[in-house]
Image (cartoon, grey):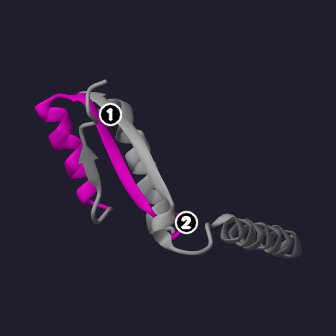
């Protein structure tokens, strides 16, 4: 029975190692500034909250390098404050910009 647990944990460890190696291969090479992620936010910002939390998780895991730009397409004052708070927990230098009207 002990051997079964060891085999399972060894297999899980191998899968985790392969997953990490695969993620490292997909990372952009070169300057960090070459990648820019743009999120569109509007209303109270709940539509981008999960995306920001996911990007924070990727950043903490070392799987995200680059800039994050949030396009303000009609955020309410509360929504903008919420988005700024979420970004301040994880990102340095996030830009929240209002695109010019077309």
Q: Above or below — where is 58 with respect to 1?
A: above
Q: Quick one: label 2 or label 1, which is nearer the N terminus?
A: 1
Queried whether the magenta region covers residue 7, the answer comes back as: no
Crowd tier of the residue under label 1, counting other residues whose Cα lies within 10 Å: few below 14, some 14–19, many 20 or above: many
Residue matched to label 2: 63
User: Where is residue 57 drawn, in percent x and y?
Assistant: 45, 58
Magenta highlight on residue 78: yes
Q: Position of residue 80 (x, y in %)?
A: 18, 39
- Disc ID at residue 93: none
Q: Residue at x 63, y 67 (%)?
A: 27
Q: Is residue 43 left or right of residue 29?
A: left
Look at 72% across and 69% down and name the residue there: 25
Callout 1 secondary element: strand
Q: Outermost residue toward the left?
A: 77
Which residue, given by chain and number where applicable, does mark 1 sit on?
41
Density class for disc 2 (Cα within 10 Å; few <14, some 14-19, many ≥20) is: some
Q: Which residues fall within the magenta stretch?
A: 62-90
Give whichever of 3, 48 is nearer the camera: 48
Identify the residue shown where x is 13% and y is 34%.
78
Do we see residue 69 in this rendering? yes
Location of the N terminus by quadrant is bottom right
Disc 2 on helix, strand or loop? Answer: loop
């Amino acid at each position: 029975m002990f051997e079964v647990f060891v085999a399972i944990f060894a297999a899980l460890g191998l899968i985790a190692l392969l997953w990490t190696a695969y993620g490292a291969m997909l990372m952009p090479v070169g300057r960090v500034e070459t990648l820019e992620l743009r999120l569109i936010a509007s209303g109270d910002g709940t539509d981008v909250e999960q995306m920001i939390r996911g990007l924070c998780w990727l950043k903490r895991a070392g799987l995200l390098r680059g800039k994050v730009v949030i396009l303000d397409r009609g955020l309410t004052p509360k929504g903008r404050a919420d988005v700024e708070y979420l970004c301040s927990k994880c990102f340095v230098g996030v830009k929240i910009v209002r695109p010019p009207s077309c």
